[in-house]
Amino acid sequence: MSEDIAGYVDVVLPVPLRRAFTYAVPRSLAGRIGRGARVAVPFARRKAVGIVVGERDAPPEGVTRIMRVAGLLEEEPLFTEELLAFLEEAARYYMHPLGEVLRAAAPALPRGALARLRKDGFLAGADALKGAAVRVREEVFVRATEQPREGRFGVAQARVLALVDARAEVSLSELRVHVKTARGVVAKLTERGLLVCETREVLADRFLAATPVIEAPPVATAAQQHATDTMVAALSGPERPFLLHGVTGSGKTEVYLRVMDAARALGRGGLLLVPEIALTPQLVGRFRARFGNEIAVLHSGLGEKERDDYWRALRRGDLRIAVGARSALFAPIRDLGVIVVDEEHDPSFKQEEGFRYHARDMAVLRAHRASAVCILGSATPSLESFRHAREGRFELISLPQRATGQVMPKVELVDLRRLKATTPAQRYVSEPLLRALRACLADKGQAILFLNRRGYSPTMQCKGCEELAGCPACSVPLTEHRREGALRCHYCDYSEPLSAPCRSCGAGERVPLGLGTEKLEDELADLLAPAKVARLDRDTASGEGVEQVLDRVRSGDIDVLVGTQMVTKGHDIENVTLVGVLLADQSLAFPDFRGSERTFQLMAQVAGRAGRGARPGRVLVQTYQPEHHAIAAAARHDYEAFYTAELEQRRELGYSPFGRMVAVRIDAPEDDGARKVAEALAAEARRHPALQDRRVQLQGPAPAPLAKVRSRYRYRFLLRGDDRRALREVALLVLAAIERGVGTARATVDIDPVSMM
Ligand code: ADP
Ligand code: ZN
């Protein structure tokens, strides 16, 4: 080892290579670079950013030319040991290059950091090294003392004491929201020895600018108490995953809050994963109401800098609780005590690009490794999770009733086959649903209508040649967006004016076919005038916009809300007494073995929006298949009946949760090229003996249901089998072939696939 070299480290880089690279550590950085550190290294003639995954005394044998680490990008290691070891296991499980996994998990490097590296390997500008980049402000925190409360209290004083009692600690700015004179009141009560104040620095994040409304926790129901006690006991011992199966409105959130509070009292951190943060402002609000500014809300609206601030604050333990969607799984929480996955059945927990992981499955893994309690919550658990519970791998805890004591809404099926004759053509709202809507409005109730198709008409047919207007780049029809005056593709950015002539025959006139949310909104506004109808889908709202629409519904400004699956999520709006499902069969028609499950989940979830307040709810479901097991069971709120029937079908067909699956996806600019690569990769798989003795079965290759997207032709094949080891070996053969090169094609291996498209 030469004089100025202190040792060697193995570094992984964000490149599609399944290996680490060894670099020498210069003396100037001696003792500062350990596992988890983010470093700059020379790679392929430029500077690349990588993560140290190991230290060594000598270079690997046979390697003669070793370059040096160019610099250290933060003083503390970016990844805690717990997080890094977990990600290493996740990378192995998904057979994905570790460097890319770590890049997906890490916050982006602050801009310009590489350019600021000095000769000695440190960053110019001390802030990045000191780790003090967090913007902070001072905040006064108020706590109650043990001193008995004697004497009389004014109204404001009593209110402040009640608020302080609701939580271990409350900031003065929060108190001021409730009591204008809080500052003076707190001073008085502090003088009497009833309160103590402490000034501390807190993060100054835009998202936390709005002060949360403190709510006193309700008295837990017996079922909530039992759930909480069992899970809290697991915090200190043998830890295990729980499946919290609670009907819609059963108060699962309250259980999450209590378990997190208990973890916090033990000095441990918590993580809450939700499907989509913009759609769950209420849930996040409740967490903030209980934990104040102690939580990091990781949302897509955060800037690089803010994300970086949060990451550091969590890693140091300044913040103990993180809330976020899928990728918050990687939050570097210290002493993790509990991970909650709310709506664990939601398909959005599966990342479908790059590092394809399932955040729910990985939450179970991370919790297990950290000896933390994992809680998967849902009213409609995935078949996989419920079977785990049935077979004892998860502990099942049920909340069979609504927390408010309200009964589950009554669900009526409207058989569209029988109504065809009586409902005018092109009328999509059946007479029974229309009557129910009118009755609901007459009763000063509100309604939610669910239709899983945005746009005005999903397809347009040419009057001349009867061709459907299709996307030139994708194998899907274009959707009419009438307000916008355009035909749009929902898979790429393509759009054309509504007035554009037919691309096949040049004729100018088209007939709209089918129903989208935009048209439904118009129809209802006509039918129900003067009631106010609004729409919630990706065209009307994103991010904060969603919250605004929901606020308007909550305030009674909107009578009827029409929307896509965005309306089915956990919204808790008291005055909604009617829910309508326009076409329940839609998701059944999907070329996906989970179509029935998805249908059951959507129906049960949207039905669960009705009757959450004082008045009972009613649900009308329009369908062509009222006897289908998913629809019939959802109508009876009978999860177990659905589970039993569906499990039987899956068993027969050998689909998840029976057997495991790996999807190999191929796409290329030419149909022929994609097919050839698919066939070559399938042939590679067939070389493995497990395919000959049928321990692993190969299905395909075949064009994907979405055969072309963005001018790329898509093929896929599936590998299935019970023998996990054999399946992995086959997948490795395919991966090796992909790494040897597939020309202009792209090929990916998707372990435990969710999307079948
Ligand atoms: P879920 O997540 O199971 O659908 P929520 O947590 O949203 O249910 O709770 C449904 C409603 O019941 C909310 O308005 C909540 O404030 C209320 N709630 C929860 N627990 C209790 C309780 N123990 N007593 C009274 N109301 C409760
Ligand atoms: Zn397209």
Image: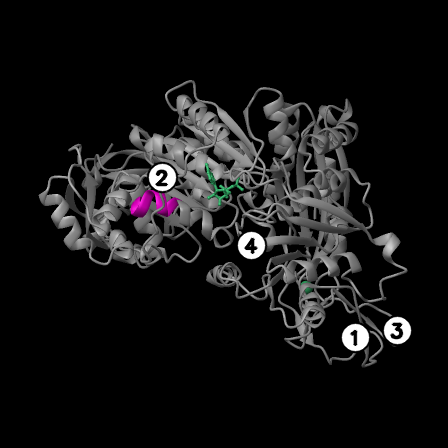
Disc 2 or 4, which lies upstream in sequence? 2
Secondary element at image label 2: loop
Q: Using the image, tell me which numbered label, if any, was put on residue 465.
A: 3
The residue carrying mark 4 is: 575
Nearer to us of marks 4 and 3 is: 4
Q: Label 4 amino acid? A: Asn
The residue carrying mark 1 is: 503
Marks 4 and 3, how far apart at CA: 49 Å
From what the image shows, is residue 161 above or below residue 543?
above
Disc 1 or 4, which lies upstream in sequence? 1
Q: Residue at x 71, y 38 (%)?
A: 636
Image quarter where the N terminus lies is top left
- Residue 653 picture quarter: top right
From what the image shows, is residue 529 above or below residue 329?
below
Q: Label 1 amino acid? A: Arg
Q: Using the image, tell me which numbered label, if any, was put on residue 722.
A: none
Label 3, residues with CA under 10 Å away: few <14, some 14-19, many ≥20:
few
Residue 404 visible to the viewer: yes
Marks 1 and 4, how far apart at CA: 48 Å
